[in-house]
Amino acid sequence: MKTSFIAALAVAALVATPALAADPTGVWMRASGSSKIRIDKCGAALCGTVVWEQSPRKDIYNPDASKRDRPVTGLRILLGMKPSGTPDQWKGEVYNAEDGKTYTGYITLQGANSLKLQGCVLGGLICKSDSWSRSS
């Protein structure tokens, strides 16, 4: 009798607790500590902008030679991120200033303060990922 009562209380607590919607907006620090990216809503999508760099640099690998002198700080690197159909995951494009290329990208919340970024090529056959933590 006690076990079924405790189980009923546990179920009631779960049902009464509101589900929190995943929210990746805010400032995130790369695992390397080299930069911070602010994720904001951009219309119906999400975008991400570099807001701080430990060692500020220029966008020297950009395929457009006229943009190679611009600073990476202030550069939008997450583009058009929309829900992917997988819970807590968004899909769009990721610009990588370290090689000047744009990849298919995914951001996935792995908890309130943890996010995984993936940049992929060949339809997702080859992906590289980075873990980010929520910052201020």
Image (tube, grey):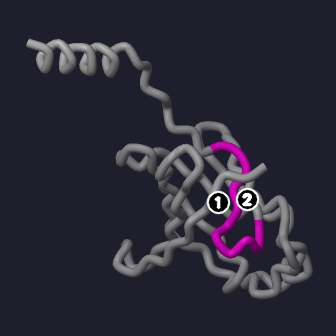
Q: Amino acid at mark 1?
A: Leu
Q: On the picture, is 17 further left or further right than 58?
A: left
Give percent across and percent down for residue 92. 53, 58
**Magenta extent:** 25-35
Magenta stretch holds residue 97: no
Give percent across and percent down for residue 75. 80, 64
Query: Which of labels 1 and 2 is toward the front?
Result: 2
Which residue occupies 48% across, 29% down? 20
Could you classify mark 1 by the number of other residues whose Cα lies within 10 Å: few (under 14), some (14-19), or many (20 or more)?
Answer: many
Give percent across and percent down for residue 103. 54, 73
The label shown at residue 37 is 2
Residue that extends furthest to the left in the rendered view of this protein = 1
Which residue occupies 59% across, 38% down? 44
Q: Is residue 32 above or below residue 30?
A: below
The residue that disc 1 covers is 78
Q: Is residue 66 above or below residue 75?
A: below
Q: Residue 31 or 77: which is nearer the viewer?
A: 31
Residue that extends furthest to the front in the rendered view of this protein = 2
Callouts 1 and 2 close, C-beta under 8 Å: yes
Instruction: Name the element at disc 1.
Output: strand
Give percent across and percent down for residue 34. 76, 74
Which residue occupies 64% across, 59% down? 78
Which residue occupies 41% across, 49% down? 84
Instruction: Name the element at disc 2.
Output: strand
Q: Amino acid at mark 2?
A: Ile
